[in-house]
Amino acid sequence: MGRPASTKKCQVCGWPGLVRNGTTSAGRQRWRCSSLGASTTKTRRDQIELSQFTQFISWVTGHDTQSSIDGTQTGRSFRKNIAWCWRIPIPAPPLTGEVHEQVFIDGTYLAYGWCLLVARSNTGLVVAWQWCHSENSAAYGKLLARIPPPLAVTTDGAGGALKAIKEHWPETTVQRCLLHVHRNNTRDLTQNPKTMAGKALLGLSRALLKVTSKTEAAKWATLLAAFHTEYSAYLKERTYARDNPLEAASRGKKPTGWWYTHERDRRVYQRLNRLYKAGDLFAYLTTAKQALERTTNPVESVNHQVKRVIKHHPGLSEDHLTCGIEWVLHSYTHNPDTPKQILKAWHAAGEPTRRLIPKKPRTTTRLGPKQHDTGLSSEEGLYTRKGWAGRPLNNP
């Protein structure tokens, strides 16, 4: 029994039967026309695309350099092979409709003036992301609108996030990140406060991070109330502008004005007292049957992986940077598609080009005198002169 003939026709004479004729130096199967004796190779374009796209995903989400992948000094061959991969749209997070027990939201600022908002569930999956210029309520509203209201949401306390939560998730319990609360307190008190009240507040702030049960939370609340009882008069002390005119001038106070003498200590106490009364400090102990996460560390870890794209692939253009970051986020979504599935869906949709994120141009007004300009400057004497201007009179 002879060799089975290939169904591929000869490219020269159209002979329907080709036989195997060894392999090329690259290991590819060679086919020979039994009529003319001409040899050819069969190219699997789908396999080449899959290999290049898989290599692209591995590179953009990893830490390998371009030169280490293609074995050259510049990585030019690799860039040429994957140039078409930048056009493939990144699959959006699937809308499963699942009501999560806890969702963490946070924003991180990146190059080219971009801000990325990310939402991650307590199961470790990224459920949504949103590009914006700042952490405002409109951007957070776009992010939250894609997710069913969870049982609890943890945030660092950004004003835009709190406003969007109140508007889109009014029934969701808010848990403030305790690490951010402690960080804000330390910024006001420093690590080594000089006053007794400041030392007591710093101790309360540190103890806040160690609360693990409702009993410990009640004890902490008792200590906060005891602090107010002891230092209530201290926190109300005022300094009048007439007693310290220099500081009043620096603060922009009127001669009849005043300010709180210990405003930093007062600010820390007011912050802790306000958050405790709102129920934002210990919501992780009272919302669910078991204790929830009390910080935004789960979403902060995703932000760290996002910024690794900038670290490991410096020099990416704005479009390529946002594309690489979205591929990293896609790897954290629920059951992410494989490169083969993504390519199949892309070809079935007619190979659409990835939609670029619109960005409004920012117009800035330069402050101060102009440097190089096309207008006339009176300081240099270069302006249109009119009138007598010191010319000698011609007496008749």
Image (tube, rainbow, N blue to C red):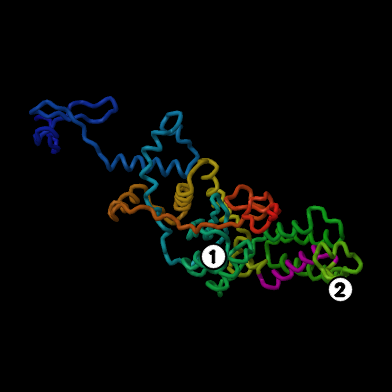
Q: CA distance from mark 1 to mark 2?
A: 42 Å
Q: Quadrant of the N terminus?
A: top left
Q: Quadrant of the C terminus?
A: bottom right
Q: Tell me the kind of residue under disc 2.
A: Thr
Residue at (60, 60) in percent of width and height: 293
- Dominant secondary structure (helix, strand or loop) of the stretch shown in magenta: helix
The residue lying toward the viewer, choosing from 5 and 137, is: 137
Pointer 2 local density, CA inside 10 Å: few below 14, some 14–19, many at least 20: few
Residue 272 belongs to magenta span: yes
**Element carrying mark 2:** loop
Apparent side of residue 150 relative to residue 9 in the rendered image (left or right): right
Pointer 1 local density, CA inside 10 Å: few below 14, some 14–19, many at least 20: many
For residue 140, the mark is 1
Residue 210 appearing in the image? no
Residue under label 2 = 256
Residue 296 belongs to magenta span: no
Where residue 246 sits in the image (x, y, percent)? 87, 62
Callouts 1 and 2 close, C-beta under 8 Å: no
User: Magenta segment, which residues?
Assistant: 261-279
Q: Tell me the kind of residue under disc 1.
A: Tyr
Above or below for 113 versus 16: below
Above or below for 3 versus 212: above
